[in-house]
Image (tube, rainbow, N blue to C red):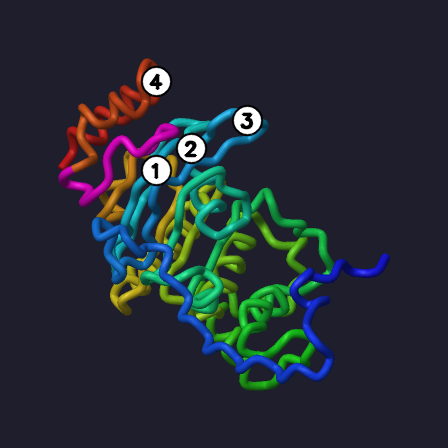
Amino acid sequence: MRPSIDIAEAATPIDAPAPAPMAALPRASPLTGLPEHSPNSPVSVHAMTVAYHRKPVLWDVEYDAPPASLVAIVGPNGAGKSTFIKACLGLVPMAAGRVAFWGQRLGAVRSRVGYVPQRESVDWDFPVSALDVVAMGRYRRIGWCLPVGRAHKQAALACLERVGMADFATRQIAQLSGGQQQRVFLARALAQESDLYFMDEPFAGVDASTEVAIVEVLRELRARGKAVICVHHDLETVREYFDHAMLINMRVVAAGPVDRVFTRENLQRTYGGRLTLLAEASEAAGRA
C-alpha cells in the first residue's frame, strides 16, 4: 500500500528550494513543571497509575528514591509492589504518570539501571553456564551479537567471586540450587555496573548463607554510592537490612527513613485486617 502524502508536500513545486534544517530541540525532562520532584533522585515517580484489564493495581503513586540507599518496598500480596518496579522500567504500561531517572527519561540512562527479576520468572533450563549468564550483564558494553572477550569474561568472573560463586562458573544454571541461582542473577546485575538497581524479592526462597551474601553485596553497593530498591516480604528484617522503606497498598501509605515510617500505625494502614501479617509487623516495629 502506497504511503499517504501530506497535502502541503504534494503542493510544493519540484524546483522549490529545500527548507533549512531545524535545530534539534532538547528533549524535555519528565519532571518539567514538577518542582516537588528532585532531578537528583535516582528515580522519581509522579502520579503513576497502572491497571490490568481496567482494574487499578497502582493508583496515583508519588515517590522519590534517595541516592546511595537501600530501599525496601513493603506491602501485602497483590499490593502492586512488583508492578511498581516493572512500570518504572517500562516493562508494563502505565495508564497515567511520569517516571524519571536522575531527571531524565529511562532511554537516556538505561545503562545506569540494573534489574534482578523474581527467580520464578526466569527459564533456568536454558542451556547456558553461570558465567554465560553473568556475561549477559556486560552486553551493553560488549555490543550485541559480538563475542565476549577475555576482559569481559574476567569482569564477569569477578562478579561471581563477589557472590561466592566463582567455583560454579562452568556449571549449567539448571544444576544450581535456588539460592545459587539467585546469587548468579545478582552477579549478573553487578556485571552491569549500574548506579540504580531494582530487585524483585531477592531474598525469596534462599538459604541463610545466601541471604547473608546478598546483604553484604547490597551494603557494598550502598557504600559505593549506588541505590538499591527491593521488593521485600520479611518484615522482621526490614530494619536490619534497609535504611529506607516504601509502604504500599495500591497507593503509597508512607515512604522515608525506616526509623520514621516503619511504625505500627503505618503497618496497620498498609496491611489492614490481615491479622497474621499485622502481628508480625507489629512485633518488627516494636524492635528498634
Can the viewer see residue 77? yes
**Is 43 on the left or on the right of 10, as rendered?**
left
Residue to which mark 3 is pinned: 54
Whole-angstrom CA distance, mark 2 to mark 4, is 24 Å
Q: Position of residue 110 (x, y in %)?
A: 47, 65
In contact (CB < 8 Å): disc 3 and disc 2: no
The residue that label 1 is drawn on is 61
Pick whichever of labels 4 and 1 is earlier in the sequence: 1
Which residue lies at the image location 22% right of the left edge and 24% below the top edge?
Answer: 282
Q: Earlier in the sequence, mark 3 or mark 1?
A: 3
Magenta residues, start to end: 248-260
Residue 123 position within the rendered picture, expressed as x and y whole percent measured from the top left: 67, 50
Amino acid type for the residue under numbered disc 4: Thr
Asked whether 274 or 212 is in front, the reply is: 274
Count of marks placed on residues: 4
Tag 3 near tag 1, CB within 8 Å: no
